[in-house]
Image (tube, grey):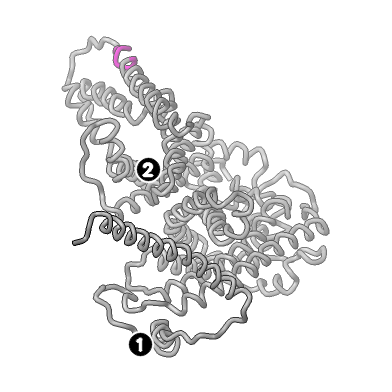
Amino acid sequence: MIGEFIDGPLWTFALTVFVIGVIWRIASILMSGVRNDLAVPKGSAGNGAFRAIFSRFVPERTVTKRGKLQLIAGYAFHLGLFALLFFAQPHIDFFAQRITGFSWPAMPYWAFIVSAELAFAGLIFLWLYRLLNPVTRLLSDLDDHVGAILVFVVMLSGCLALAQSFEVLRLLHLLLAELLLLYFPFSKLMHAFTFVMSRGYTGATMGRKGVNA
Amino acid sequence: MINSRERINRRVGRISFTGLLVFLVLYSLPLEIIAETKGSQEMPSVMVLNPAAELWRDVRQREGSNIGISQVRGVDSGVLINANGDRWRKFRMEQLIPIGGSILVGVFILLGIFYMLRGKVPIEGGPSDRKLFRYTTYERMIHWFVASLFLFLAISGLILLFGRPVLIPLMGKEAFSVLASACKEGHNLMGPLFLVAVVLIFIRFVRRNIYQRGDLSWLLRGGGIIGTKHVPSNFFNMGEKSMFWLLILVGSLIIASGLVLVFPLFGQGREWMELAHVAHALGALLMIVVIMGHIYIGSVGMEGALEGITTGYCDLNWAKEHHDHWATEVIERGEDLSNEAVERLRRSEPPGGVKLHLQEHGK
């Protein structure tokens, strides 16, 4: 009964809220508009935006030097999670069956294990840093912690269900993933989409001013 | 000529005979079985030599180490019955689980009794208005990283080891099978991270954990736990140093044996796996017992012990009472700070650590 609800109506509801919520958030940002800049442009805003979106993947030297741990943990977590989400065989099967209608090649089992190890180590380190470093602790609010905990329990429940032998473990993982989908659009987890606009806006502003930043 | 009446009579006769035969066979079979069962219950058993005993003795290889030939290519594929497996299973069920469980429960009870007798060891001079910087953010991070992994691995491992006798009576077989599957997957996945954690701990803390003068006297005086006198010690006392080396050495054994169990890719056979399991379980039980003591002191056993690893700063009086050699050095360098200064620093700690704080604050 509960299983059917999690597998059926709740999944549809969570996915709908996620899709509409993300579109609504992105649309609201895009529709808020930008201040009209009357100055004569000294460079291309488009080029600046494009450059900033990609160049920011490589951190500044000072950041590399002082925030080595956050940098390594950050990349380990995000890349590991990305690989798990889109290239784990059970996820591909789920997407093909429920959303896309087609599948794509999955990563081998050893790569799955490595991705999971990287994602877990990265997330635990980042969360501990958030809790223990005085600056990040003060900057963090409930949303940051709820987001981190939700992502962690979704990942953990997925790994606990790895044997794929028990329906209850799969349903637990799905339920937690649905809670994450419901929470996602209203939280800072939206940075998964909005980082493009944020970087693009900064890059465009600087590009228009002719600043190489 | 046989007339039709006779043909019918013969046919009826054949059918009747066949039916009677079937009836008798069907009727007699259960009776035979019942009779045999009754007989076996009532009559004394007779030893019948198994004509295949020799064959099975050879198969079990109790009296020889010859391995058979098989078309299947793989480790232990020529071994049909692993006699050592039975020995390992008996050790696990009859010694490891009952004795290991008794030790864990016993240590827990002992800690409880000790707490009731001794209570929380207070800071004798009371909390001071000054603090000493003890652990950087990175050091606290790797401490809690290894701590969280250890707790997860210990709990999931204990469920796997003691679940059958302890949890099945409480939650039933079906619920336990789900829990055991989850624990097994989680344990296997988080296990390799423990290797990373132990390596990070080793690199960061090894210098401060090398034994030095004064450590032995700390040990001989029981670390001050017995009696009321304080025993001088360095940044880490003999007990902490010994726990560090136990974590590194026994932790390495647990990790190595765990990798043998999780990745059966390097040609290790069943005997190696059994050996690895025993080493893994014994090492883990030892570490759990030691960590129970560590958690006891850090939580309810001693006032001020947890502060350093949560905030990075420890109370001056606590440091004088438990790590006075180190506390004296820090005070001589003029690096003790007021509580207010620590509060300010904790709100704006830069990555450079305490030296940078002190420079910024003109000390």
Residue closer to the observer: A82 or B67? B67
Front: mark 1 or 2: 1
Position of residue B7 measured from the top left corner of the image (x, y, whole percent): 25, 58
Q: Amino acid at mark 1?
A: Asn
Residue assigned mark 1: B66
**Splitting the image into 4 quarters, where does residue A83 fall?**
top left
Q: Do we see residue B61 in this rendering?
A: no
Q: Do we see residue B224 in this rendering?
A: yes
Residue at image location 31% in from the left, 83% down from the top: B68
Residue closer to the observer: B260 or A47? B260
Position of residue B20 measured from the top left corner of the image (x, y, whole percent): 41, 62
* Residue B318 in the figure: left or right of residue A151: right
Q: Is residue A139 above or below residue B186?
A: above
Cα distance, mark 1 to mark 2? 54 Å
Residue assigned mark 2: A74
Are dots 1 and 2 in contact, CB under 8 Å? no
